[in-house]
Amino acid sequence: MRTKVRRRLNAIVGLIIMVATVAVGLDFVMQREAKKAFIEGEIACLKEALYYEGRGGIVLEQLLQGMIILARVADKDPQWPKTICGAVAQDRQFSYYSDEDVLNRPIERAAMARADMLAKRLYFGAWKTQFLPRGWECVRFYKVSDAKLTSMDEKHLAQLKVSKRSLGYFGTLRAVATIGSHTFYRDPERCVTPLPTT
């Protein structure tokens, strides 16, 4: 009799262990799939930003724009969102993000393919193989360079939605370098997390 009870208990315990193992396995798979979906979403946001912010620029310019976005995410300063999608969607940070006219234009396939390649390279290589240049540990901002802005007429400025308030804000920052058609800046008063450079 005791043997039968033990066998039944062992069978029940075995069944419980099997169910628990399957549940843990399913949980692991679900977590892995959720992580994969999150990474794909982050890369898509970075790709979109690289495309719209720098598709006409040189590769180095796009790489640096992407690194600035990633630097904002990596920075412990509470002013920056902690995801790439959050950083890109942050209010008044990227002019294309809320501009329906820009978002509804036909996509240039070659430029989008380049942005996709650069986004993946940056996402998986940031702070491993991709770094900010020396002296850029606190750079978190960029905009179309003043030389390019002064050569634009009012219509172009309106299309870029460059406000006088925005231009005034950049006056409080320190320009670090101009690469391609963009000037990169740091805030001399605020640098919570200096990031690795080359």
Image (tube, rainbow, N blue to C red):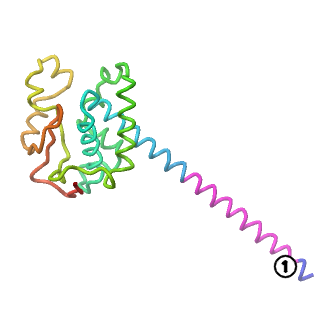
Q: Residue 62 magenta-drawn?
A: no
Vertical comparison of 194 with 165: above or below: below
Considering every residue shown, the one lying at the far right of the view is: 1
Residue at 41% from the left image edge and 37% from the top image edge: 44
For residue 150, side relative to residue 139 (left or right): left
Identify the residue shown where x is 17% and y is 50%. Answer: 136
Tell me where residue 88 sits by quadrant. top left
Total marks shown come to 1
Is 64 positioned to the left or the right of 3 in the image? left
Residue 130: horizontal and vertical position, in percent?
A: 30, 50
Kindly identify which residue carries mark 1. Answer: 6
133 left or right of 115?
left
Q: Main secondary structure of the magenta part?
A: helix
Q: Quadrant of residue 20?
A: bottom right
Left or right, residue 9 beside residue 51: right
Measuring from the top left, give residue 85's x and y in whole percent.
Answer: 36, 42
Magenta stretch, residue numbers: 5-31
Callout 1 crowding tier (Cα within 10 Å): few <14, some 14–19, many ≥20: few
Q: Name the element at disc 1.
A: helix
Q: Position of residue 55 (x, y in %)?
A: 29, 29
Q: Position of residue 111 (x, y in %)?
A: 34, 27
Quadrant including the N terminus: bottom right
Q: Quadrant of the C terminus?
A: bottom left
- Tell me the amino acid under the disc marked 1: Arg
Pick the front one: 78 or 37: 37
User: For residue 15: magenta?
Assistant: yes
For the point 11% across and 18% down, which residue is it?
153
